[in-house]
Image (cartoon, rainbow, N blue to C red):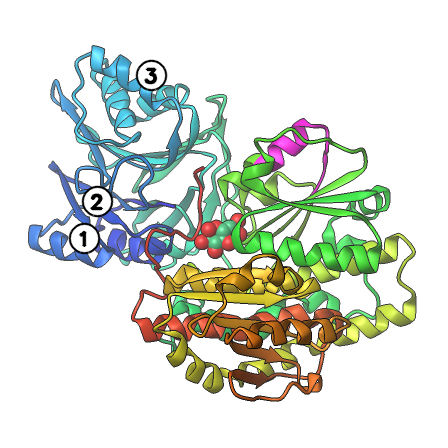
Amino acid sequence: MCGIVGAAARRNVVPILIEGLRKLEYRGYDSAGLATLNGNLDRVRAVGRVADLQTRADQARVDAPTGIAHTRWATHGGVTEDNAHPHFSAGAGHEICVVHNGIIENHEALRRRLREQGYVFHSDTDTEVIAHLVHSRVVSGDTLFEAVRSCVRELQGAYAIAVISKAEPDTVVGSRRGSPLLLGVGVDGSGKGENFLASDTSALLQVTKYVAYLEEGDVVEIRPDGYTIVDADDAPASRPIVESQLSADAIELGQYSHYMQKEIFEQPGAIANTLEMVAGASALSPELFGADAAEILGRTRQILILACGTSFHAGLVAKYWIESIAKLPVSVEIASEYRYRDSVALPDTLVITISQSGETADTLAALQYAKQLGQSDTLTICNVPESALIRQSKLRFLTRAGPEIGVASTKAFTTQLASLFVLTMVLAKVHGRLDAKREHELITQMRHLPAAMNHILECEPAVRHWAQRFAPKEHALFLGRGVHYPIAMEGALKLKEISYIHAEAYAAGELKHGPLALVDRSMPVVVVAPNDALIEKLKSNLQEVRARGGELYVFADRDTHIDPSDGVNIINLHDHAGPLSPILHVVPLQLLSYHVSLARGTDVDKPRNLAKSVTVE
Ligand code: G6P
């Protein structure tokens, strides 16, 4: 969504703010801006990328020890400089600037009231109400900290904010509810204190590894020499300072051209890290999911999975696994649908949320809704420790993929799948559906996954060659069957996200019920072809496509023995990997979309209109 950085130091913080925004650019990249205090309150904004803001800031020669900055993914109001943050309020000798991530749901009511008080609005954003609201308090005598503390009580919705006031030149005040914000505690080169705020740690690694995660409703005042936190009840609070384990290398591109490419190739390592505790063990224990897992998983009679985007596809794969191996019924719902529909809550349901970021607004709201319906057994599979989803779930499993920066999710997906497979086995075991021999076999197969994935990555040159032929196309169909149908869905999503080619996925058996009408010589049809129980049926579906002149691009397990022929292009992968096959079969589809995007010259890591982490509805 949007990214926030704030700094209160004794040196020029503009380079720190801009470098922080660069690291947060994955959260939004429509426009960017900063505001600083150095005698005056200066504001610089630019439509476009952080690089455009940097050019403007260089031209304006801003140099200040205190400031706030923002990179935006537009929700309320178009992509214009007027709508770019920071938003400003001035009058009666006071000047206020605010940056905000999230959505203020009652902004219209607040706007009406503030207009009646004489405030004039210069943007279409919901954020501007916060600037005027804080200003109205400061004018009536509040300090900035007091003003923000009383203002946030009036805000409904989700927010992380950072605010500065001309009257308090060394202070930044922040607050969060629903959107992430953390405090960074640092020391400058001359040993003097300095403090920071940011949407995530990656923005602050340049200055400190010591961070405190703010809780829901917290308000924090930072100054160079210290900070003060109050909680949602306005009572003094302390939050533990932790040393971030995130390494600066993990967020650098290194030898790669794009984060997506880097993240695709990091998958063997990411899976090895995620499965570390499992692969070393001779048997699986429910405690991998938390102290109460044996009891909760033991009483589970059915499962409800809630997620969005790529994480939703991981949930769909898990349904096939859990129903076939653990024999528990599973339903999988798009979080934004579930949260607004009437559904029947069944007793002893385990509610699983899956999320890379742990802060997707729809997934969080769906989890809250599921709990309201009385379903309190919750488990989240997530890549971000301390995220809102982790904190709101009884059980958890961390995918140890490391930071994922490319908007199109890759290593988060395969590590989610690996985690969900572990969960499947644990559920099967707890419910007496996995004998020791089978458990041992499956653990052995999981241990082999990183090596198998390295092997799959070797297909890159062949995929790159296909990508040249795909690049001029405007439509593509993806086919899969069974547990590989969600993999076809994920392949289609990857292609449309970053290459802007319209791509649809179908369960191959459904082809003749409609999509076959689309097939002609200009329609590439990508097929996920594992050598599983459905392979003969899939081969018949391929014939249906060929008979209509469609060109097939088939990713086949080597032991399927599908031969290339006119209009049938084959890339052979590994021998069939059994139940773990979906984790491998998605990799060539990721590579295909990456190389098609390169060939079309689109922005691989920052595709138009999208954001990595969608913290608003
Ligand atoms: C956005 C991202 C997707 C992601 C989805 C869910 O749309 O662009 O890549 O799959 O959000 O995000 P989550 O962090 O909950 O997995």
- Residue 53 - label: 1
Mark 3 or 1, closer to the camera:
3
Dot label at residue 34:
2
The residue drawn where x is 44% and y is 41% is: 615
The region drawn magenta spans 366-378
In the figure, 219 relative to 14: above or below? above
Disc 3 marks a residue whose amino acid type is Ala
Number of marks in picture: 3
Q: Give how far across and how far down residue 382 sits, in percent.
A: 59, 52
Q: How crowded is mark 3: few (under 14 residues within 10 Å), some or many (20 or more)?
A: few
Q: Is mark 3 on a helix, strand or loop?
A: helix
Nearest-to-viewer mark from 1 and 2: 1
Q: Residue 109 carries which label?
A: 3
Q: Residue at x 54, y 45 (%)?
A: 387
Which comes before the other along the chain, label 1 or label 2?
Answer: 2
Q: Camera-side residue: 453 or 464?
A: 464
Are the residues flagged by discs 1 and 2 in contact, CB closer than 8 Å? yes
Q: How far apart are marks 3 and 2 (CA)?
A: 27 Å
